[in-house]
Structure formats: C-alpha cells, structure tokens
C-alpha cells in the first residue's frame, strides 16, 4: 500500500535562541511539545545561501515555499551570478561567449551599460569586472563602459570611489569608461522618456559634456552640489575633441544590471520601438541583458535566464496520478499554490485547491487565531475521506501575527495553531497519513529586540522538522530543499536528478 503524506507548514514558527523574545517558547503549546517528545525531529535552515538568498539575509515565505516545493535551492539572480563569478563558470557562459566571439570576428565594439556600485540591488561592480576580464581573454580591443552612477542604494557621493576602483581594475583588465550619467536619467522606470532620451543621446549621438577625465567630471558635479543619482551626461573625448565611443549599428551591447526593472526603458528605445516624438529610433545591435528584463522583448539575448522549475513535487504527484490538496487561508494561499508549484499559476491535474478567506480586520493582532480553525475544519473533513495522497497545508498565524509585534496577540496566535495541529495530526494518523511538520522561516520565535522593543521582522533562526511516523526513528538536520526528497522517499516515489535536495530519512 502506498504511503500518504501531509506536509504542515507553520508559517513563522522558528526555533528561538533567546527565551525572553521567543513567543513560541513562552506560549502554552502542549501538543507540539508532545510531538517533539514522541517523534523524531530535527532542524532546517531557512535563510541566506541555504535558500538561495545572499548570505545573512532572512528567509521569507515566497522563497521558502519555492525551495520546499522544488526540492532544490533556488538561487536569486544576485547569488547565482555571484557564484558564477566566484567559481569561474561565468567564463563558460554560452551567451557571453557568443557575444564576444561575434565582436572578435566582426571587429565591432563592445559596450557595457549599467550601474557601477556595490549596492547589490540592481547590479554589482564585480560582475562588470568579470565581464571586462573576459573581453581581455577574447583579445577584444574596443571595449567601452557606459557608467551609470548610483547614489540611491549607496552613499550619494560614493560614485567617484566606485569609478576610481573600476579604473584601477581596468589598468590590468580591459576597457575604457566612455560615458557617465546618473541613474535618474538612464534608469528611469516611470515612462519619463525625456530622461531616457538624455541617456540615449549620450550613447548613440555622443551628446553630453565633453571631458578628458571621468573622475574629474564626477568631482566637478560634486563641487556643483550634484550627487551621483543626478549626474548630467558626460562623454570622454580624445585629443581632437571627438567621443571615444558611441553605439553604432552592429555593435555588441551588454546591460549588466541583474535587476530587471530599471534598464527596461533604455532597452526599449535602443532595440524594440522607435519614438519619433522624442527623436529616438532603434538600432540593429547584438543586444544582451544579464537577466530577462521583459518577456515581450524580441532579439535580446539573455545571459542568465530564469530557472525553468519543472519537476516540482506537485508536478511529480500529478504525473504519478496521485491526488493532492493545497490549503491555506488567503494570506498564504499564493504560497501553497503558485510558489510551491515553482511559479506556476494553474493547478496540476489531480490537484485540489482550498482557500479559506482571511478575517477582514485592520491588523491581525485584533484576531490572532485568524482563520486557523476554519482551515482545520476544512482539512479534517478531507482527511477523513482518505482520498488525497499528498496535502500541503499552511497555518499563517505565527508569521502574520508575528509581524504586528503585539506580544499577547502572538502568544494567542501560537496557542491557536497548537490546538489546530492537534486536531489535524490526530485525524491524519487515524487515516493512514505520515505527517511532516515544518516552517518556512521564523518570526514568532524572535518577537522582542534586545532593547525591549517589538521585533516585527522574520528571524534567522532554524525551524523545527517533526516526522510524525512510527516507522522512522530519526530525521536529519537539513535545509528546506530537503523536504520534497524526504516526502518522495516516504511515499516510495523516485527522486528526479534535478531535485538536488537530500532525503532527511
């Protein structure tokens, strides 16, 4: 007889390290306490690189459910590109090799456009360094950087330092900083085409203040009280006063921002559509972007495209002909459906979705139990039929009430969840289900800051993983990506190679 599994995600229920800040430890949770005494349990890491986020960054529900459902770590763009730079795999990137090979064979110029700073929100300067190093390996001698200064995600006067570091890097690498402009213009995202035009005219027509030193040009802006974000267009000129480089037909252009929103408009006017009313027309270019800026763009190469999240646990259940249920209240419904399915909107064949409306209150401290009892009742009814082979359930309270920072309400929320867990687990056991109780990240476990003020953010703490089963005597520590492989093993299903997580049993 094939096994059936209920995965219960207690949102925001972490393993606290400071008892005085840990509402879960302070609350009365007899049933969860009894599960830990009776069944094998361990801890899962839910933050930083263990879930594909930058080191030290707290996990969240979107990332958590994505990792749980996919059974592999889903790296965010920044982390993914950082890793490619660190391990050298960026040098093997097919799209970049194609771009630089074309430039070498055609004798065309290579232009890098992007935000030069260490802000890490839209771009990271070391990604640009790696690209410049690569052009040197390809023996390219016409490499130009169109630097956009930051001043929003970094100090408003830090641009000179970043461009100074870039110039130092270029001394032993490859490339010339050809233009300079503040992000206010080239990185507009509000359809202020007159701002974008300043960038377009700078790159295509060489329209800007002619300068013989980029660093001096920045200093002059500072002296006039203009910060990085608003630096006016400047272009490096040669001894004859001519621009060292403009973008011309057939050139290679690479936008190295990994965040998709703020180089989209510039990409539109350079490659997608003419705007005669602003005097901007597209050019025929070999144009590439670091990530997928827009699904509708035509003729734009993508250096690091989105992961195609196939073979998530939901898809595997469906292909195997198994019935599954996803259930949560409104606040976490997208997490057990869209995110748990790897970014897929529609249900799989054999998948039933149950959404219980969240209470209509201004803030959830006013109703700490939220709709947990209704979620409990709905799933108990389904469990009694014994029909679903797999269930993914989320109780939202620890996270949503945790975000209010109201201590007494968080205690009530946790206690409500404990009583719901009891009803659901006991019904599941009586109907032949193995139950795995986990969380996607912490919150209620760290509800008070060291200074005594409320902490409303997620925590960096690990979360519990309890295996309610008489068959297994232990369960290993791991990460969220290990949960799906564990479920597959318990259900006697094959783990596909793309699922890089490891079974915890």
Image (cartoon, grey):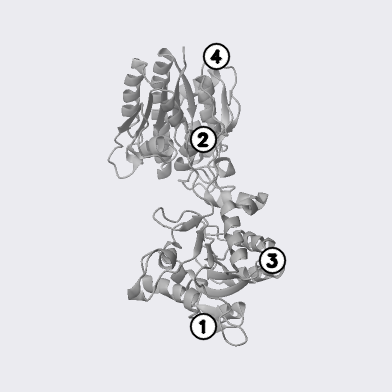
The residue that appears at 42% across and 55% down in the rendered structure is: 294
In the rendered image, which quarter is residue 18 located in? Answer: top right
Residue 223, label in figure: none
Residue 209, label in figure: 1
Residue 14, label in figure: 2
Q: Nearer the viewer, residue 263 or 54?
A: 263
Callout 4: few (<14), some (14-19), or many (20+) C-alpha neighbours within 10 Å? few
CB under 8 Å between callouts 4 and 3?
Answer: no
Question: Which secondary structure, mark 2?
Answer: loop
Question: Which secondary structure, mark 3?
Answer: loop
Q: Residue furthest left?
A: 360
Q: Nearer the viewer, mark 4 or mark 1?
A: 1
Distance from disc 4 to disc 1, alpha carbons, whole Å, reads: 75 Å
Q: Position of residue 169 (x, y in %)?
A: 68, 67
Callout 1: few (<14), some (14-19), or many (20+) C-alpha neighbours within 10 Å? some
Distance from disc 2 to disc 4, alpha carbons, whole Å, reads: 26 Å
Q: Nearer the viewer, mark 3 or mark 2?
A: 3
Earlier in the chain: of badge 4 and badge 3, it is 3
Q: Nearer the viewer, mark 3 or mark 1?
A: 3
Q: Position of residue 449 (x, y in %)?
A: 52, 46
Distance from disc 2 to disc 1, alpha carbons, whole Å, reads: 56 Å
**Residue beneath disc 4:** 471
**Residue beneath disc 3:** 173
Q: Position of residue 314 (x, y in %)?
A: 43, 30
Q: Nearer the viewer, residue 248 or 166?
A: 248
Image: 143 above or below 84: below
Distance from disc 3 to disc 1, alpha carbons, whole Å, reads: 27 Å
Q: Position of residue 195 (x, y in %)?
A: 41, 73
Earlier in the chain: of badge 3 and badge 1, it is 3
Question: Which secondary structure, mark 1?
Answer: strand
**Horizontal placement of 296 versus 473: left or right?**
left
Q: Nearer the viewer, residue 286 or 304?
A: 286
């Amino acid at each position: 007889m094939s096994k059936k599994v209920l995965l219960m995600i207690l949102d925001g229920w972490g393993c606290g390290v400071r008892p005085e800040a840990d509402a879960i430890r302070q609350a009365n949770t007899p049933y969860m306490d009894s599960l830990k005494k009776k069944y094998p349990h361990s801890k899962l890491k839910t933050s930083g690189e263990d879930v594909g986020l930058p080191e030290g960054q707290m996990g969240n529900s979107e990332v958590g459910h994505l990792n749980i459902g996919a059974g592999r770590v889903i790296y965010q763009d920044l982390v993914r590109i950082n890793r490619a730079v660190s391990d050298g795999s960026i040098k093997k990137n097919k799209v970049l090799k194609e771009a630089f090979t074309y430039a070498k064979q055609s004798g065309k110029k290579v232009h890098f456009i992007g935000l030069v700073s260490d802000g890490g929100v839209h771009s990271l300067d070391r990604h640009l360094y790696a690209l410049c190093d690569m052009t040197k390996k390809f023996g390219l001698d016409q490499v130009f950087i169109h630097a956009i200064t930051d001043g929003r995600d970094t100090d408003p006067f830090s641009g000179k330092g970043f461009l100074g570091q870039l110039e130092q890097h270029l001394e032993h690498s490859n490339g010339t900083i050809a233009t300079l402009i503040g992000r206010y213009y080239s990185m507009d995202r509000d359809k202020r085409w007159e701002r974008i035009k300043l960038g377009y005219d700078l790159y295509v027509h060489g329209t800007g203040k002619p300068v013989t030193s980029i660093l001096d040009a920045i200093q002059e802006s500072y002296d006039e009280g203009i910060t990085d974000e608003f630096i006016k267009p400047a272009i490096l000129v040669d001894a004859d006063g001519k621009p060292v480089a403009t973008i011309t037909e057939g050139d290679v252009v690479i936008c190295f921002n990994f965040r998709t929103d703020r180089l989209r408009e510039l990409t539109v006017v350079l490659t997608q559509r003419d705007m005669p009313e602003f005097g901007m027309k597209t050019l025929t270019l070999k144009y590439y972007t670091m990530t997928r800026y827009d699904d509708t763009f035509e003729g734009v190469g993508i250096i690091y495209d989105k992961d195609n999240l196939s073979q998530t646990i939901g898809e595997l259940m469906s292909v195997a002909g198994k019935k599954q249920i996803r259930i949560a209240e409104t606040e976490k419904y997208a997490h057990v459906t869209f995110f748990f399915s790897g970014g897929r909107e529609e249900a799989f064949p054999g998948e039933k979705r149950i959404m219980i409306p969240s209470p209509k209150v201004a803030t959830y401290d006013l109703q700490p139990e939220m709709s947990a009892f209704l979620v409990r009742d709905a799933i108990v009814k389904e469990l009694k039929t014994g029909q679903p082979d797999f269930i993914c359930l989320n109780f939202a309270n620890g996270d949503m009430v945790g975000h209010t920072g109201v201590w007494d309400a968080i205690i009530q929320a946790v206690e409500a969840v404990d009583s719901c867990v009891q009803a659901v687990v006991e019904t599941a056991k009586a109907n032949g289900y193995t139950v795995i109780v986990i969380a996607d990240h912490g919150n209620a476990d760290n509800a008070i800051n060291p200074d005594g003020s409320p902490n409303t953010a997620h925590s960096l703490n690990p979360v519990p993983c309890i295996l309610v089963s008489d068959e297994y005597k232990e369960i290993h520590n791991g990460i969220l990506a290990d949960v799906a492989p564990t479920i597959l093993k318990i259900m006697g299903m094959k783990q596909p190679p793309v699922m890089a997580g490891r079974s915890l049993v």
